[in-house]
């Protein structure tokens, strides 16, 4: 059989200008799940192709002619596009559609309206039986992998869209449980691969000629001694890359040996969830860090030449606009290489979603708006449009043209040029959003600007007066 895996994306992200901007932000990569599952099917004798719609166009008409099974992986923000593709497949071919991923796991009944079968959770142990028809249930419960070393490596030979950076996932899950996080819930419990197994995969990518590597663990440095040993092996066995990205936490600043090893192994780009400089806000989301941790992490990354991507969550109930601006200013003051301003997004299955649903604060269930760039709920201290404006203010303020020279002096001319282009795209995106908010009826920005809902605290005051 011919099996095609598709990771869809929204209309905005399929625009060539957006794709180009993504290449400025970081190196193109591909979600590993379809490459693992596809590799299992290929080894069993099937013809398999995989496409990451974010990174390139798909010749969909050609695929409809000879594909027997389409496997579509959906997260919340790309689920509507996934449903659209599934409906086209059913309309124009006799192919089966199998869906999986975080959104299909949480919104199974919704996904079943468009798919022949839905796989919930981890699919490695069931994918072959589902594709070959031995499991016919419409809802298939995946079986969690106890020994991650038994999972085959991603098969990049089946990937048909561009990819510059290879992804390694050395653990599944996260020992922390932030209230807005989905992955720590889908991939519980927290599990680790052996270091030998991780190094073998890294060696494969080195031999394949990849120049960039990403550790896609939710928290690569959760186990510091393990992270150190992986770095030591990478250095000793000449398995370093031009740049390796990873997710970390502020507590990495507590270990100087770890920081030196990260630098020497070229793990020189890290995303750290700063989230807020308001301790009450950090406590409310169960972040498990304090303001001093954040300051030390910023200083440590700068000292060891590790380019920090500062993730700030916009719209936490305890944060005012002034609190958010203070966090953004902090990221700028510590010369963070990049900023990820993330609008608080209540994904299905998370405590924050359940809270906002209970309180009647969800203002939309249009899933393509759940991408951490758009406001989907009624904030506490401001209107939805004011929070949306804060997202663009954060990007414009942080990415100014002057800072590109500073970053170039600290990290090199290549990164200074990237920072300049990020400043350009921040202004272009802000301009486009404001034009849409005034003229493009039906767009998320128009809807938010014309939504007459006051802040939660204002509503409470009005009720008290009555």
Image (cartoon, rainbow, N blue to C red):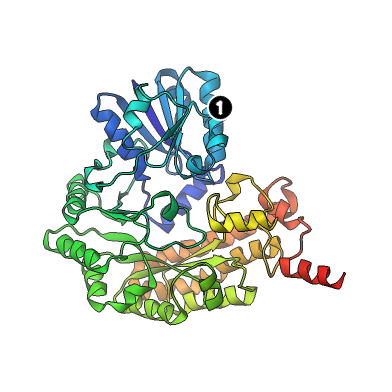
Q: Give x and y (percent) for residue 239.
A: 17, 57
Q: Is residue 305 above or below residue 199?
A: below
Q: Give x and y (percent) for residue 150.
A: 22, 43
Q: Residue, x 20% and y 45% (percent of image)?
A: 208
Q: Mark 1 falls on what kind of element? A: helix
Q: Give x and y (percent) for residue 231.
A: 20, 64
Q: Is residue 30 above or below residue 126?
A: below
Q: Give x and y (percent) for residue 81.
A: 54, 37
Q: Quadrant of residue 107?
A: top right
From the image, which quarter does the C terminus lie in?
bottom right
Left or right of 377, for residue 438? right
Residue that numbered label 1 is attached to: 87
Mark 1: give few (<14), some (14-19) or many (20+) Cα within 10 Å.
Answer: some
Q: Is residue 261 visible?
A: yes
Q: Is residue 347 above or below residue 329?
A: above
From the image, which quarter does the N terminus lie in?
top left
Taking depth in this image into account, of 170 and 391 the one nearest to the observer is 170
Q: Residue, x 44% and y 72% (percent of image)?
A: 288
Q: Is residue 278 visible?
A: no
């Amino acid at each position: 059989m011919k099996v095609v895996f598709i990771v869809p994306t929204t209309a905005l992200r399929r625009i060539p200008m957006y794709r180009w901007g993504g290449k400025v932000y970081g190196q193109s990569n591909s979600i590993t799940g379809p490459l693992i599952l596809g590799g299992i099917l290929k080894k069993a004798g099937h013809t398999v192709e995989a496409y990451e719609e974010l990174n390139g166009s798909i010749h969909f008409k050609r695929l409809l002619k000879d594909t027997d099974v389409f496997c579509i992986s959906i997260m919340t923000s790309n689920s509507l596009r996934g449903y659209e593709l599934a409906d086209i497949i059913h309309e124009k071919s006799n192919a089966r559609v199998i869906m999986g991923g975080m959104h299909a796991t949480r919104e199974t009944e919704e996904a079943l309206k468009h798919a022949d079968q839905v796989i919930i959770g981890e699919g490695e142990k069931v994918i072959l039986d589902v594709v070959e028809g031995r499991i016919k249930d419409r809802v298939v419960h995946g079986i969690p992998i106890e020994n991650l070393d038994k999972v085959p490596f991603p098969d990049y030979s089946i990937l048909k869209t561009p990819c510059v950076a290879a992804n390694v996932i050395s653990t599944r899950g996260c020992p922390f449980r932030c209230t807005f996080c989905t992955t720590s819930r889908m991939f519980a419990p927290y599990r680790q691969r052996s270091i030998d197994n991780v190094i073998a995969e890294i060696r494969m990518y080195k031999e394949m000629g990849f120049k960039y590597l990403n550790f896609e663990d939710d928290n690569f440095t959760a186990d510091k001694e393990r992270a150190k040993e992986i770095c030591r092996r990478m250095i000793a066995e000449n398995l370093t890359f031009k740049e390796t990205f990873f997710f970390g936490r502020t507590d990495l600043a507590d270990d100087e040996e770890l920081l030196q090893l990260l630098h020497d192994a070229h793990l020189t780009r890290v995303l750290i969830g700063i989230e807020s400089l308001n301790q009450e806000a950090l406590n409310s989301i169960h972040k498990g860090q304090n303001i001093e941790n954040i300051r030390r992490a910023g200083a440590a990354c700068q000292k060891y030449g590790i380019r920090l991507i500062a993730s700030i969550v916009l719209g936490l109930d305890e944060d005012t606009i002034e609190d958010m601006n203070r966090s953004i200013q902090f990221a700028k003051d510590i010369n963070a290489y990049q900023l990820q301003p993330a609008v608080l997004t209540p994904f299905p299955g998370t405590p924050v979603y359940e809270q906002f649903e209970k309180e009647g604060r969800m203002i939309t269930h249009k899933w393509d708006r759940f991408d951490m760039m758009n406001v989907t709920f009624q904030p506490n201290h401001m209107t939805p449009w004011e929070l949306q404006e804060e997202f663009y203010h954060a990007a414009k303020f942080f990415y100014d043209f002057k800072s590109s020279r500073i970053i170039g002096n600290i990290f090199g001319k290549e990164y200074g040029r990237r920072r300049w282009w990020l400043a350009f795209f921040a202004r272009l995106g802000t301009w486009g959003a404001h034009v849409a908010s005034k003229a493009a009826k039906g767009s998320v920005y128009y809807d938010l600007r014309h939504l007459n809902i006051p802040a939660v605290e204002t509503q409470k005051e009005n009720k008290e007066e009555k």
